Image: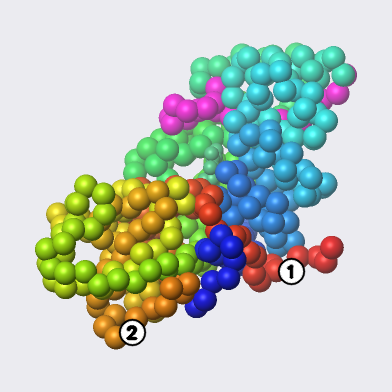
Amino acid sequence: MALTSGLGGQLSIDLGALARNWRALDKVSAGALTGAVVKADAYGTGITMASKALHAAGARFFFVATPDEGMAVRAALPDAHIFVLNGLYPGAANLYVRQNLMPVIASVAMLEEWLAKCLERNEAYPSAFHFDTGINRLGFRLNEAGYVRERIQALGYAPQMLMSHLACADQPNHEKNRTQLALFGSVMAQFPGIPASLANSAGLMTGRDYHFQMVRPGIALYGGRAVTGRKNPMAPVVTLHVPIIQVKEARTGETVGYNASYSLSRDSRLAIVAHGYADGFFRSLSGSNARPGGKVAIRGKLCPVVGKVSMDQIVVDITELGPNIPEPGEGAEVLGALIGADDQADAGGTIGYEVLTSLKGRYSRNYVGDGNLPQG
Ligand SMILES: *Cc1c(COP(=O)(O)O)cnc(C)c1O
């Protein structure tokens, strides 16, 4: 495959696969509304295009982390319901109101600021309430539920949704899932009639008990593995090809890269590939003699990274390709059919989420498979 852009590499995002993934998850959680988490530039795929494709597939409820991300979704989708997971940023209530963003309120301070805005404008602006059932990240503590209930009852205010977040959903048998489920039930009992949402992608796949009225998948939409130790049923969305810039021969005993951390045990053929840690290929994917690193596919075959990943380049051992020698300018597959985000993550000691959200490198982004986008 020849690559043409001046940046060299090409990140390709399959909006049709994204749409199919959303519809598949919507089927699994048939009794609940299926939202779409599009934070962090839609897990590296581009928040505007991804949100439009998800909307065309049927999604109406979008979750972002920051108000800026909320504004990006609002600009793309005038009728979307948008929740800001990080909550109400101090001093930003006017912005949320103007952009019609719903803060996921996580503390008494956020609650008071939001209620003050509602009182000032005499308008019950929508929000969600986030309760911490054991992750010890964002959320009201459980013993604040009584105060919160009294406070809003006194004003005649009600949130659109109650929310909590699972700490261990990627391990479906972890006992903390049942504990959090039970504690979430105790919160819901204190706010009768308010719709509830607990499940991320993994929670959605864990079972109906976790679905309630809304599920919030992220990683699974983008083809990532949500549950550990299980076959990933989602369609891959992202492929990344980057150019080979030089091919060279090297001799037994020579070393490769910074720190001379890899020495060749045979005469070898090496491909120098224009892709480095500045492009999202982690330095932990370096290959030493003691520890194998990441792989990329060249001419349809997985080949190992040898030596340190540097800022702009990796060196790949292509000796095994024999006479099938790639040309400079030809693409090496970093993400695609032969090696996925979770494979790179496993090799680099991280998770697919980090691989996808690190896709901000020096390559062009192109979209394929329109996901039934309306024209214009
Ligand atoms: C990121 C996030 C999600 C989506 O999680 P995935 O594991 O990507 O499906 C859902 N809920 C909250 C609160 C989140 O922060």
Q: CA distance from mark 1 to mark 2?
A: 39 Å
Say whether disc 1 or disc 2 marks the residue closer to the N-terminus.
2
**Is the magenta region chiefly helix, strand or loop?**
loop
Q: Quadrant of residue 249?
A: bottom left
- The answer to whether residue 147 is left or right of residue 137 is right
Going by the numbered disc 2, the residue's amino acid type is: Asn
- The answer to whether residue 1 is left or right of residue 5 is left
Instruction: Locate residue 5, reporting x and y percent.
Output: 59, 66
Going by the numbered disc 1, the residue's amino acid type is: Asn
Residue nearest the observer in this picture, 154 or 215? 215
Residue shown at 35%/58% (left/top)? 314
Residue nearest the observer in this picture, 30 or 105? 105
Q: Which residue is mark 2?
A: 324
Q: From what the image shows, is residue 212 above or below residue 26?
A: above
Q: Which residues are magenta?
A: 122-140
The way the protein has been coloured in the rendering is: rainbow
Residue shown at 70%/47% (left/top)? 61
In front: label 1 or label 2: 2
Instruction: Locate residue 14, reporting x and y percent.
Output: 60, 67
- The answer to whether residue 238 is left or right of residue 213 is left
Q: Which residue is mark 1?
A: 372
Residue 134 among those drawn in magenta:
yes
Q: Is residue 76 visible?
A: yes
Q: Is mark 2 within 8 Å of ligand 1?
A: no
